[in-house]
Amino acid sequence: MGTCLAVINQKGGVGKTTTAVNVAAAAASRGVRTLLIDLDAQGNATSGLGIDRSELRQCIYDVLVGAIEGAGVPAEDVLITSSVPHLDLIPATINLASADLSLASQIARETRLRDCIESVRRDYDLILIDTAPSLGILTVNSLVAANAALIPIQCEYYALEGLSQLMRVLELVQRNLNPALRIQGVVLTMYDGRTTLSRDVAAEVRKHFASRVFNTTIPRNVRLAEAPSHGVPATVYAPGSSGARAYVELCREVLDDVQKGTRART
Ligand SMILES: Nc1ncnc2c1ncn2[C@@H]1O[C@H](COP(=O)(O)OP(=O)(O)OP(=O)(O)O)[C@@H](O)[C@H]1O
Ligand SMILES: [Mg+2]
């Protein structure tokens, strides 16, 4: 059974999608059977893998909400094979925007994703869930389905803002819905070693989260921002770039921890 990681931070634009897509692609390129689940109505992970969302008839919404409406779509039916070998995708379309509302009044609404992906879980060694910048029901679903949270933090002003709220949600989910939930680690993103700000923020985050911060820091690198418009992960678009190489390294750290079953970062 594969390990499932929720890439989460309710702050927008911190590098969640870039991290989810590139760690997934880096794992897949090592032959790790990987599934990326797009749980954000913005669908950035979906388009980042070159999938035209306007052509999709079904998405994760139909899996999660269809079940309630009696027209349940099995997760298998919305799976897409990506252009990266060993990497599959469960896509999101704009329909997902109404999922929070549709799920709000439902029984077992927080465990729906976990239940819905049960049938495909054994087919993968690693599952990454890209979440929206929100702590709504969908994001809680990702934490219930996951074994651990992967938290990108952008090396900018206010980096730590909102993190105590995020930690509170993690604790609540752990206490009430998913006792096994761990923090896989915090990853520093968009690091620019030339600026004091980046260095200060990185130091502050390392002080705050100590050993839970991954050794690998993701640099600010334009190739990472360009890759999505080419419909491929940066690890494919520009494998030699500093950004792609950092994600390959981060992936190695993540897989090492997962394989060792390390709880060092909890
Ligand atoms: N290390 C980096 N260097 C340069 N640009 C980056 C880097 N990481 C991400 N970006 C760019 O910054 C923007 C935000 O990144 P991304 O979409 O991954 O964040 P996000 O947390 O998923 O955002 P949202 O909260 O909206 O889902 C994107 O345009 C992305 O291409
Ligand atoms: Mg995103």
Image: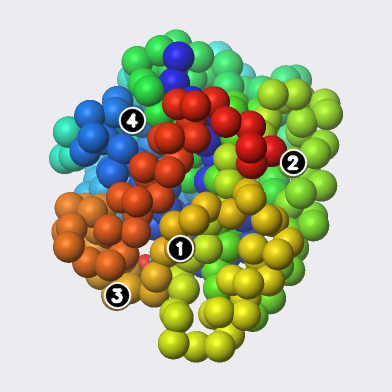
- Residue placed most toward the observer, 50 or 35: 35
- Residue placed most toward the observer, 140 or 204: 204
Disc 4 crowd, CA 10 A, few/some/many (<14, 14-19, 20+): many
Give the residue pinned by disc 3. 222
Looking at the image, residue 115 sits to the left or right of residue 128; the answer is right
Q: Is residue 178 above or below residue 167?
A: above
Q: Is residue 229 above or below residue 25?
A: below
Give the residue pinned by disc 4. 34
Rendered-image quadrant of the N terminus: top left
Disc 1 or 3, which lies upstream in sequence? 1
The verdict on label 2 being within 8 Å of ligand 1 is no
Rendered-image quadrant of the C terminus: top right
Q: Is residue 256 visible?
A: yes
Of tags 2 and 1, the one toward the viewer is: 1
Question: Quadrant of residue 150 in the image?
Answer: top right
Q: Which mark is residue 217?
A: 1
Looking at the image, residue 155 sits to the left or right of residue 241; the answer is right
Q: Position of residue 122 (x, y in %)?
A: 40, 12
Q: Position of residue 132 (x, y in %)?
A: 56, 51
Q: Amino acid at mark 3?
A: Val
Of tags 1 and 3, the one toward the viewer is: 1
Q: Amino acid at mark 1?
A: Thr
Q: SS class of the residue under badge 4?
A: strand
